[in-house]
């Protein structure tokens, strides 16, 4: 059944995030495990980014619907909390898409899990001269920063 | 109504859930009213995190108390006396200084508590806590930044922070209260020892207040009762507002 696992993973992985439709739930690391048993029953694990994220219920319904439409009637979508989601699970493709979308991606952590002390680059002009304006932005996962060179404000996907 | 005799862990998780829900509702009351757009967004973002924490804890409570109640049943269909949140979270928003002091006192408590609960013997509680730690870290940072700015700000902002501290500090004692429920859950490794949380809490609060040129008020009054369902006057009004839609339109979904 390896092929159906791969197929379901691909289908579910292409579902866009409701709040950041430029990215898929695969890009964000929200899609975790996909399992198919011998009888064809599908179990998909997803994990919330933040405890109260309102997008999670939409994602759960989208995953269930998409997989059913592909001919798997028995679908269970489980919400798993542990291990807790981290921006380290965001894919490289996801980081590039965020930048193209005008959102500074989360910084990567070094091997010791400490944040590398790099500035957050402005997604408009690339300058490293940016500072945080507000810790909370348009969604739970974003902060607001401003660039002192091009003077644009921009969202930053917070390291979490 | 049916009296549910639940085990101590269920009472404990209900306390955690009610603390987060009530504080969430208070912060949501700032929506469109905060002094700056950024803080309107910050306070409602924090409210959303807290609501998510509450939902997880209500779901766990329903498993532990065996009633299978939904999150909505706990939030919207219990009366004031059935809520077991601490008194601090239910205090009115007041001015911005009052809200910031309440946030500082609450988020420092919640962060220390969630950090300890990541080691809980209850795996579901530990999983919720592991997510909540990251969120409460932001909440405490937000309250800390504003405490410094207002405490070490103008005469007016300093004075308002002093008044807020004097008003809210008495409610802190209840956070670290020990009763039969906490003794049971601490003994089973479900929850941390309140005395240890209290020491961590004091160390952080003293550091922040010092940096903000503020002082811990001397207090003799130590109100309590929230954990037994005995609440302060503003709470009934808040519950009425929070539950109105659900009770007026039973079973409504949106």
Image: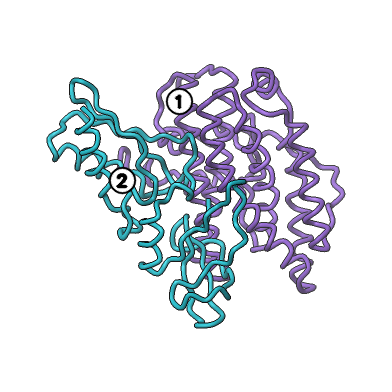
> Looking at the picture, how far across and down is residue B73, in whole percent?
41, 33
> Looking at the picture, how far across and down is residue A79, in whole percent?
38, 35
Classify mark 2: residues with Cα within 10 Å, few (<14), some (14-19) or many (20+). Answer: many
Nearer-the-camera pick, A84 or B122: A84
Label annotation for residue B161: none
Q: Name the residue located 49 percent from the left edge and 27 percent from the top edge.
A: B61
Classify mark 1: residues with Cα within 10 Å, few (<14), some (14-19) or many (20+). Answer: some
* B112 up-or-down from A106: above or below: above
Furthest residue in direction bottom, as rendered: A150
Chain that appears purple: B
Nearer-the-camera pick, A66 or A108: A108
Q: Name the residue located 69 percent from the left edge and 58 percent from the top edge.
A: B144
Label annotation for residue B62: 1
Tell me the subunit letter for badge 2: A
Chain A colour is cyan
Helix, strand or loop under label 2: helix
> Looking at the picture, how far across and down is residue B9, in whole percent?
58, 22
């Amino acid at each position: 059944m390896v092929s159906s696992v791969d197929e379901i993973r691909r289908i579910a992985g292409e579902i866009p995030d409701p709040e950041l439709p430029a990215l898929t739930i695969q890009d964000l690391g929200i899609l975790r495990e996909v399992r198919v048993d011998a009888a064809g029953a599908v179990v998909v694990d997803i994990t919330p980014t933040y405890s109260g994220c309102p997008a999670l219920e939409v994602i759960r319904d989208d995953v269930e619907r998409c997989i059913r439409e592909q001919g798997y009637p028995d679908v269970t979508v489980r919400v798993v909390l542990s291990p807790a989601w981290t921006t380290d699970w965001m894919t490289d493709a996801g980081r590039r898409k965020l930048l193209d979308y005008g959102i500074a991606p989360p910084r990567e952590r070094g091997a010791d899990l400490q944040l590398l002390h790099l500035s957050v680059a402005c997604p408009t002009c690339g300058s490293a001269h940016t500072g945080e304006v507000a810790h909370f932005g348009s969604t739970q996962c974003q902060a607001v920063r401003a660039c002192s060179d091009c003077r644009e404000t921009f969202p930053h996907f917070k390291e979490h | 109504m049916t009296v549910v005799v639940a085990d101590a862990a269920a009472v404990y998780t209900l306390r955690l859930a009610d603390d987060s829900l009530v504080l969430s509702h208070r912060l949501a009351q700032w929506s469109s009213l905060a002094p700056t757009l950024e803080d309107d967004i910050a306070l409602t973002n924090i409210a959303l995190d807290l609501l998510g924490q509450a939902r997880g804890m209500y779901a766990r409570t329903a498993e532990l108390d065996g009633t299978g109640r939904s999150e909505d049943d706990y939030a919207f269909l219990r009366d004031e006396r059935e809520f077991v949140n601490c008194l601090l979270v239910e205090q009115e928003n007041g001015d911005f200084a009052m809200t910031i002091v309440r946030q500082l006192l609450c988020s420092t408590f919640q962060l220390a508590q969630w950090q300890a609960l990541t080691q809980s013997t209850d795996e579901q509680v530990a999983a919720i806590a592991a997510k909540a730690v990251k969120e409460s870290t932001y909440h405490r940072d937000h309250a800390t930044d504003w405490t410094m700015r207002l405490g070490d700000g103008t005469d007016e902002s300093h004075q308002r922070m002093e008044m807020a501290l004097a008003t809210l500090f008495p409610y802190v004692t209840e956070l670290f209260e020990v009763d039969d429920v906490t003794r049971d859950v601490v003994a089973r490794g479900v929850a941390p020892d309140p005395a240890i949380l209290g020491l961590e809490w004091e160390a952080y609060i003293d550091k922040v207040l010092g940096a903000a040129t503020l002082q811990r008020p001397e207090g003799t009054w130590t109100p309590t009762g929230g954990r037994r369902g005995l609440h302060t006057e503003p709470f009934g009004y808040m519950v009425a507002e929070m539950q109105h839609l659900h009770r007026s339109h039973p079973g409504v979904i949106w």
